[in-house]
Image (tube, rainbow, N blue to C red):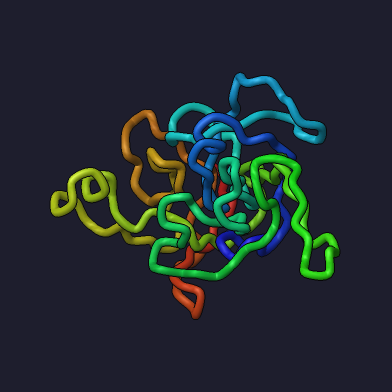
Amino acid sequence: MGDQVYRMKDGEELPVEPTGTLLINGWLPGVWVAYSTNPITLPGGLATVDLSDGTGVLAGFLVTGPQHNQPVEQLSDMWTTETRQRDGGDVHADWGPIDAGGAFELDDQLQLQRIGSRVVTMVVPPTGYHQFYVFETENLAERTIPGTGAALTYSSGDKLYVSNRGRLTSEQESVSHVWTGYVVGNAGSNDEGDFIYTVAAVA
């Protein structure tokens, strides 16, 4: 598992095949997805998923990935292709799948280190307790037009939604944005950055 989302306890998992926007742009672990109508093309995947905009059915969030476009840009499975770092500047490496296909990576002794895979792990909400380092830090207005919005705060018991770019947020960005079933258990900071704990709750 990457250092963007830590599983604190349990959580139902499903192997899924990312498609659409996810394959084009890559993704950070912790991004939320929706079920896709694209057919399954890889063995092992039980469903296909694409980036969620926070409305409709929330399939869950990915805890591994991303796969980058071919050819491989860099051998990391965690970075978006634009910034290659977490919000706040974290530069930890998270090794796993190395590209969008089934490519191999060998060390200097020609020993197999990693093999790429496009089937990744999705947690089905609202199950388990998780620590997220990837979440929105500014509201939609501020992300859209800087200077017009505000920073987001996270307090114990706050309901968590999914933003228009697939990240956890304490803001319900529209009446169409649905609750994830999680609330904030705790928010804080450590040597890896700011985090929130998510706790499953009953509506």
Q: Residue at x 38, y 61 (%)?
A: 154
Residue 90 point in image, percent of width and height: 47, 69
Q: Quadrant of residue 100?
A: top right
Q: How many numbered marks appear? A: 0
In this view, the residue in front, 200 or 39, is: 39
Q: Is residue 171 left or right of residue 60?
A: left
Q: Is residue 2 left or right of residue 58?
A: right
Vertical order, 189 against 42 (above or below) = below
Please tell me which residue lies in front, 76 or 18.
76
Residue 111 appears left or right of 129? right
Rendered image quadrant of residue 41: top right
Q: Residue furthest toward the left?
A: 147
| Whole-percent x, y for residue 13 in the image | 73, 45
* Rendered view: 114 above or below 93: above
Q: Is residue 156 visible?
A: yes
x, y (%) of residue 17?
A: 68, 34
Q: Residue at x 74, y 40 (%)?
A: 15
Q: Nearer the viewer, residue 76 or 152?
A: 76
Q: Quadrant of the N terminus?
A: bottom right
Q: In the rendered view, would you say 3 is above or below 57?
A: below
Q: Which residue is located at x 60 percent, y 34 percent?
A: 59
How far across and how far down the image is residue 89, in percent? Answer: 41, 68
Identify the residue at image location x=53%, y=60%. 132
